[in-house]
Amino acid sequence: MVIVMKKDAKREAIDRVISEVTTLGFTPHISEGESRTLIGAIGPAPTPELREHFGAMPEVETVVPITKPFKLASREFRHDDSFVMIGDVKTGNGRFVVAAGPCGVESREQLAAAARIAADNGARVLRGGAYKPRTSPYSFQGLGDEGLELLAEAREQTGLPIVTEVTTPEMVANVAATADMLQIGARNTQNFALLAEAGKSGKPVLFKRGMSTSINEFLQAAEYILSQGNPNVVLCERGIRTFETATRFTLDVSAVPVLKELTHLPVWVDPSHAAGRRSLVPALALSSAAAGADGLIIEVHAKPEEAKSDAAQQLDQAEFASLMGRLKSVVQALGKEF
Ligand code: PEP
Ligand code: MN
């Protein structure tokens, strides 16, 4: 349930509710709104008596049960859009952000060139995998710690905060010490130990939907991060598996408005991994923005044909520049800041 405090409720009243929530065996999650504090009480389904009990406490406005299996992510917990800060970059609640960069960090020169393309064309976040989860153990696995150092250098040079993938719970603390945002990939959407560890780090998390994860399962998985006290979750649709083979995955554009109905969290789309082919990326990117996404993550490479992973889907300088120009018009037509 969510206990909604009265406008400008006093600190003592808020603290009393929090302590009562804890005493009665629930875990409190506090959300400070502009003038109102919400206290989520997560635990067993509350009885009507219990709701009445909290409703009668001083300076409590109302008590709202959360009917969904996902609690902290739900619009019942928080009605208004939330936003997430990636370094000093805001996403969500009317702020549209593009993250761009190579699939994998391959070398200093390769990353620097891709980071330039990203920064010069209006991307606000730099992506790049240092640890790559590959389908085959014989494929390029990423540069690991060296890749992280190169990302930190590219951040110095461009001023862009960096997002990079974590693939095991054990590596989270190390990657979190360098990255501005942790990416959890489609192959780890239900790696609950990894999600909990990313939650504990407190870092913003770019949380991708698994290729066979339903939206309901996706949002419940997000609770593993949120329930650790980390509210900084950005959800990302990146294509699901269907019978269709003309694209690498089928981009579920409907996931965007469906998620926006169900959750207050920012929703991004990754058109690159859905498309699998660069010629399709712009159309998927533009349609995702039009569907209401709060951001995009796009793969770019100065020489896509030489990329060590996902060569077919990375945009080059000209393709990315052209897409960003058109994207700006779509985003601004929706009344959002680009
Ligand atoms: C990636 O972003 O490089 C990646 C591996 O994406 P996904 O987890 O969506 O396949
Ligand atoms: Mn990739």
Image (cartoon, rainbow, N blue to C red):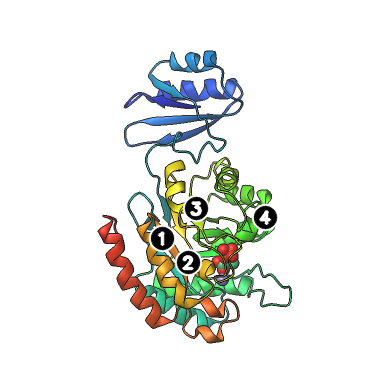
Three-letter amino acid code at the position of disc 1: Ser
Give the alpha-carbon distance from disc 3 to disc 4, as whole Å. 19 Å
Sequence-wise, the earlier of marks 3 and 4 is 4
As shown in the figure, which amino acid type bears the numbered disc 3? Leu
**Which of the two labelled residues, at mark 2 and mark 1, occupies the earlier sequence position?**
2
Quadrant the C terminus occupies: bottom left
Q: Residue 169: which numbered mark, if any?
A: 4
Asked if the residues shown at circle 2 and circle 1 are in contact, with their CB atoms under 8 angstroms apart, the answer is yes
Q: CA distance from mark 2 to mark 4?
A: 27 Å
SS at mark 2?
helix
Residue at image point 59% right, 52% down: 198
Q: Earlier in the sequence, mark 2 or mark 4?
A: 4
Q: Which mark is residue 235?
A: 3
**Label 4 SS:** helix
Residue 89 vs residue 226: left or right?
left
Nearest-to-viewer mark from 2 and 4: 2
| Ligand 1 neighbours mark 4 (CB distance < 8 Å) | no
Task: Quote the CA–CA distance across marks 2 and 3.
Answer: 14 Å
Q: Mark 2 = which residue?
A: 271
In-image side of 168 versus 51 (left or right): right
Determine if residue 29 is in view: yes
Q: Helix, strand or loop at disc 1?
A: helix
